[in-house]
């Protein structure tokens, strides 16, 4: 791939930028300039601001990718970011204006993952360390899953309850990779959000942590998004 298209990866709750460690080299090998954001997870507003700073530093067209809660972040961050040409959601929240993670979580039965979430006395949410592997990364290497549980980065309750602003997916082409074995976000909810945003949809038989257990499928949908928008741009010249 000759052009240096940028890919900015945005992690979700209970994870950090290293959760993309298997996807990054696959994208780099295809010639992409890859950056992984490190979110503070202190509020949706804070996380959007951090991501916008990363986007402003990119030179040229950029594909913005979000996993899980990171989907809510990219939905807001891509607004007023003219270099973002595509959005890619990986088992992620594609919120509409006025929605929150809390609101969506109340619309259906409690998932196995939600049942493992524990608040602390400082306003943050954690996944029980002993239940983490099963509900978050059941198909990952067991040792890797235990490490993920040990280093998990908690999500603030403020991030969980804050309502989304106008969604960028209404004006930017979107792709969505559904995890059909997800125990954090129900797969039907993922399919609903993907359909609502008019996304190009693919499905992988994966846990919530698809970027860890199935990095090739994750890289492939990012590459597909980048290739599609690049070809479309070339066709308009």
Image (cartoon, rainbow, N blue to C red):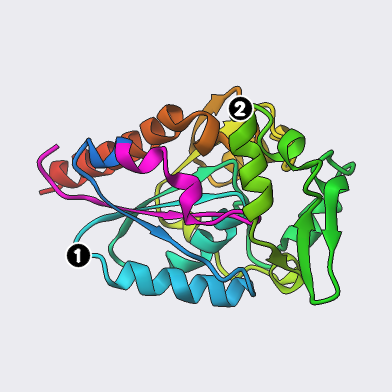
| Region of the chain picked out in magenta, as a range | 1-25
| Secondary structure category for the residue under label 2 | loop
User: Which residue is at 65% across, 30% downward?
Assistant: 142
**What whole-number distance in Å separates the C-alpha atoms at marks 2 and 1?**
33 Å
- Residue 20 pos. (x, y %): 45, 46
Tag in front: 2 or 1: 2
| Secondary structure category for the residue under label 1 | loop
User: Which residue is at 80% across, 77% downward?
Assistant: 122
Res 38 seen here: yes
* Other-residue count near label 2 (Cα within 10 Å), few / some / many at <14 / 14–19 / ≥20: many
Q: Quadrant of the N terminus?
A: top left
Pick the front one: 98 or 108:
108
| Label located before the other in sequence (2 or 1) | 1
Q: Which mark is residue 169?
A: none
Could you tell whether 166 is left or right of 156 in the image? left
Query: Residue 8 lies in magenta, yes or no?
Result: yes
Res 81 seen here: no
Q: Quadrant of residue 151?
A: bottom right
- Residue 125 pos. (x, y %): 77, 63
* Other-residue count near label 1 (Cα within 10 Å), few / some / many at <14 / 14–19 / ≥20: few
Is 206 above or below relative to 62? above
Q: Are marks 2 and 1 in contact (CB under 8 Å)?
A: no
Query: Residue 75 lies in magenta, yes or no?
Result: no
Q: Residue furthest top?
A: 205
User: Which residue is at 30% across, 67% downward?
Assistant: 82
Q: Which mark is residue 206?
A: 2
Is 218 above or below relative to 32? above
Residue tagged 1: 59
- Residue 172 pos. (x, y %): 40, 54
- Residue 206 pos. (x, y %): 61, 27
Pick the front one: 173 or 1:
1
């Amino acid at each position: 791939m000759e052009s240096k298209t940028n890919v900015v990866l945005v992690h979700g709750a209970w994870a950090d930028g290293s959760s993309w460690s298997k996807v990054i080299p696959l994208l780099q090998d295809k010639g992409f300039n890859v950056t992984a954001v490190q979110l503070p997870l202190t509020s949706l507003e804070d996380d959007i601001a951090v991501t916008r700073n990363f986007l402003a530093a990119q030179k040229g067209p950029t594909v913005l990718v979000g996993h899980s809660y990171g989907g809510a972040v990219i939905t807001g961050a891509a607004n007023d970011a003219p270099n973002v040409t595509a959005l890619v959601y990986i088992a992620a929240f594609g919120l509409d204006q006025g929605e929150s993670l809390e609101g969506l979580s109340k619309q259906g039965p409690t998932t196995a993952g939600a049942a493992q979430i524990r608040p602390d006395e400082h306003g943050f949410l954690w996944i029980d360390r002993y239940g983490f592997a099963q509900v978050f990364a059941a198909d990952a290497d067991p040792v890797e899953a235990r490490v993920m549980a040990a280093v998990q980065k908690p999500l603030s309750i403020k991030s969980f309850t804050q309502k989304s602003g106008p969604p960028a997916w209404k004006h930017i082409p979107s792709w969505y990779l559904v995890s059909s074995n997800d125990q954090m976000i129900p797969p039907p909810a993922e399919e609903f959000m993907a359909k609502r945003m008019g996304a190009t949809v693919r499905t992988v038989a994966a846990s919530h942590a698809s970027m860890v257990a199935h990095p090739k499928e994750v890289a492939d949908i990012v590459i597909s998004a980048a290739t599609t928008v690049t070809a479309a741009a070339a066709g308009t010249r």
